[in-house]
Image: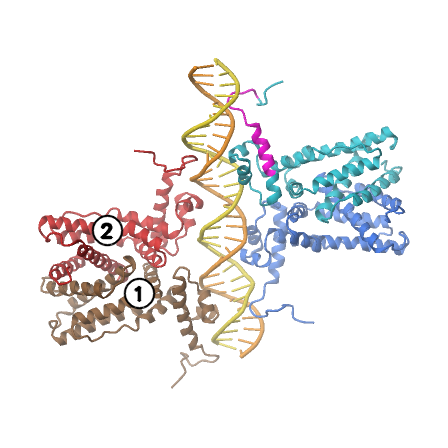
Chain colours: A cyan, B blue, C brown, D red, E orange, F yellow
Amino acid sequence: MQSRTPAGRTGRPRSAAADAAILAATRQALVELGWSKLTLGDVATRAGVAKTTLYRRWSGKNELVVDAVAELFDELELPDRGSLAADIEGVVLQFAAILARPEARSGLMAVVAESTRDDALRERIRASIVDPQKDLVLEGRARARTRGELPPEPDPLAVSRTVDLIFDMVAGAVVHRTLVSAEPADEEWVRDFTRVLLHGLTAAAPGPSGM
Amino acid sequence: MQSRTPAGRTGRPRSAAADAAILAATRQALVELGWSKLTLGDVATRAGVAKTTLYRRWSGKNELVVDAVAELFDELELPDRGSLAADIEGVVLQFAAILARPEARSGLMAVVAESTRDDALRERIRASIVDPQKDLVLEGRARARTRGELPPEPDPLAVSRTVDLIFDMVAGAVVHRTLVSAEPADEEWVRDFTRVLLHGLTAAAPGPSGM
Amino acid sequence: MQSRTPAGRTGRPRSAAADAAILAATRQALVELGWSKLTLGDVATRAGVAKTTLYRRWSGKNELVVDAVAELFDELELPDRGSLAADIEGVVLQFAAILARPEARSGLMAVVAESTRDDALRERIRASIVDPQKDLVLEGRARARTRGELPPEPDPLAVSRTVDLIFDMVAGAVVHRTLVSAEPADEEWVRDFTRVLLHGLTAAAPGPSGM
Amino acid sequence: MQSRTPAGRTGRPRSAAADAAILAATRQALVELGWSKLTLGDVATRAGVAKTTLYRRWSGKNELVVDAVAELFDELELPDRGSLAADIEGVVLQFAAILARPEARSGLMAVVAESTRDDALRERIRASIVDPQKDLVLEGRARARTRGELPPEPDPLAVSRTVDLIFDMVAGAVVHRTLVSAEPADEEWVRDFTRVLLHGLTAAAPGPSGM
DNA sequence: AGGTAACCGAGACGGTACGTCGCGTCTTCGC
DNA sequence: GCGAAGACGCGACGTACCGTCTCGGTTACCT
């Protein structure tokens, strides 16, 4: 192993505790103030840290909040509930539970909004938040295939297209339900949604577009 | 008919041209600067209007942008393309076309993000943007029913639940595809999506939960 | 008799009551708010008058306040107390009494300050406020001369110089005492001041500079 | 001795150069614009300083101008011209010279006007501007006493009363001559004034009121 | 064991935008 | 045509954060 400091250097190393304190303070501030009223000076104060220390690690509000929110999604995992439908329901419920937390709600949508004009930010969001979720879709399909619930892998290009579609439908529906319609994505809704999604995928599968 | 000015009728009336100029300037600024760099002072200048005039009509950036973006959605209408699937594809494409415009992208997501902490704002978004869209879903279902593509109206409560689900799935998927995945919701994607959605709805329909 | 409207004109004549109401409202506002916080909109409201009406009669805050304060000095008159010293004491006390009123204090000094960069304003102050006071000095000297307390009139140029000096000394001392030292110009102070002034004038009179 | 920074010693220290630049810019703006058109934003710009820096040091226009004008009076000193009359003439001429400068004229009167409704401001004016001048009167009397031009010190209470009266007469007359009458307090006027004042004081001295 | 370089807190700095207030002008309606 | 009501363009206000920059002082690594 090696030291964390990038290029084995002299001088005092950065405090590891500060990073955690800053991210926690960011989430706390998101809960209490929301995205638009969150200020970096306030986050620094909450974390017991100087503004300088914060700016040494993050270049601005967007990047900081992405990282703070990303940690919330680390707890997402694919439960093994025995069937594809049940697995999907499980993960959708987890996703909905995260979006129900106030620090995720405004923070996530705000950085997504910002990312429409900032490619680096969108890439950061994709890498920290979106791709890990997409991996769950892939993992779920693989598990279903071993169970025999899905046919063997078709050609890879079609797979990618299908996975992307599934992901947009799942994430999009939950986000829209939670944030725009402002209704809870509870078990009943998730059951309805999962049924439509699964039936749609299996029924549409043999179609000519190779789904 | 009657006079438009509701109650107090004295004094110089508000300029109607100013409203239009301000909303147009807001959209222009959204295109050029994006949400976060848009300032009300700049919008006022672009509109050839004093800041006070703007503040007399809108209480802040959020409300202004909601109204500016809402006008973009006024052009949405349900085309009659002859079949339910084609109608859906048509309206989804229109929706996608609007979301492809930069003044809608960042503006819409940003106000949605803000609305997570501002109930009045969420209600404004719902009334000006969301509900008109939802009406299209209702209209489309009614038309399909006269065509015989859908069974006659089941009980009203289930209808509401289904319409809400459809709406969250349609709007959510398009938004997520466009803004998060940052891929175009083009004809091919819309065709795939519509197939899955329609198959899912018809296949799931006879289920015990009354869908 | 005839109408007040200057050049016998058509249309509704200006309300004479409005002028008085505006000046009274100005003094009231001076008392409550002071010069710097006095606003013309507020004066108009207090007077039950529209801003337009006010601006039709006065061109701005300075001119309005000069007129409002000038009315306070109309009550100044030269009492006949039997001797020059007593006459002076009397008029100085009256002057001090006016300066003790809050509507005079801040209003007067403020317009004087403004007049340092506005010749028209200074002329207006001189005509409405200063010259009437100076006339009292002339009147007092004439009366003293008939009493035999002063020698007959020397050459007119020297008179003007002396009157100006007396006036600057009297008005200046009272103003400074009242506003800068912030002590009351009461009877005792006025007696002391008058003694020094009169002794100075009579003792200095035979001097070579013709006083 | 000890460190200058009183208590909190951490953080970047305030720039001493900024204070001087701001006061100089204030005087320059007073000359060019006068009190009423002087804006703190403009002063900051002239000083090459941010508005916040200015507000960190002064709470508003009044306080700033008092300090800016006070520095003008620092150059006042009592010349030794050999006699009491000559000394007085000298210091009055200095005082008049300062009041002849445009940065003093409008600035000084305006803050005095404001001070009629702001006790803290009046105290600030007294401490920075008035009291130093009054000290000159005391110094002049002491020097005259060593010369034998004045009798030895009478009782202290009467002294205070006399000094206050002298001061109000001197400062008041010069201010009134300069600002209200708008005539120069030149050597001739100062000679006349000094003669009246001195004769008045000496002639009145033996009076019963203890002067 | 000492030197030194990067870290840390605190907080002042030059900026930019905020949302409000007052100005003096204008536009409308009613008397 | 006058007067009330009030919207208008304008410009300054005083505040809040931004992201940067000194400060003095503290570690941990590397001789």
- The percent position of residue A147, horizontal first and vertical second, equals 86, 30
Q: Is residue A153 visible?
A: no
What's the chain of the residue with tag 1?
C
Residue D139 covered by magenta stretch: no
- The percent position of residue B179, horizontal first and vertical second, equals 70, 42
Does C168 sit left or right of B23 as displayed?
A: left
- The percent position of residue A49, horizontal first and vertical second, equals 52, 34
Q: Is residue D111 visible?
A: yes
Type of the residue with mark 2 = Gln
Q: Kindly give the residue lying farthest to the bottom in the view shown.
A: C1
Q: Residue at x 59, y 70 (%)?
A: B9
Task: Indicate whether E20 appears above or below A192.
Answer: below
Q: Which mark is residue D133?
A: 2
Task: Indicate whether A12 appears above or below A176.
Answer: above
Between the C-alphas of marks 1 and 2, the distance is 24 Å
Residue B12 sits in quarter: bottom right
Within 10 angstroms of label 2, few (less than 14), some, or many (20 or more) residues?
many
Q: Residue at x 63, y 34 (%)?
A: A67
Does F15 sit left or right of D199 as displayed?
A: right
In the rendered image, the quadrant that contains the N terminus of chain D is top left
Of tags 1 and 2, the one toward the viewer is: 1
> In front: F8, or A162?
A162
Residue at the spot of label 1: C100
- The percent position of residue A145, horizontal first and vertical second, equals 85, 30
Residues shaded magenta: A7-26
Task: Indicate whether D206 appears above or below A184.
Answer: below
Within 10 angstroms of label 1, few (less than 14), some, or many (20 or more) residues?
some
Does C140 sit left or right of A154 as displayed?
A: left
> In front: A30, or B7?
A30
SS class, disc 1: loop
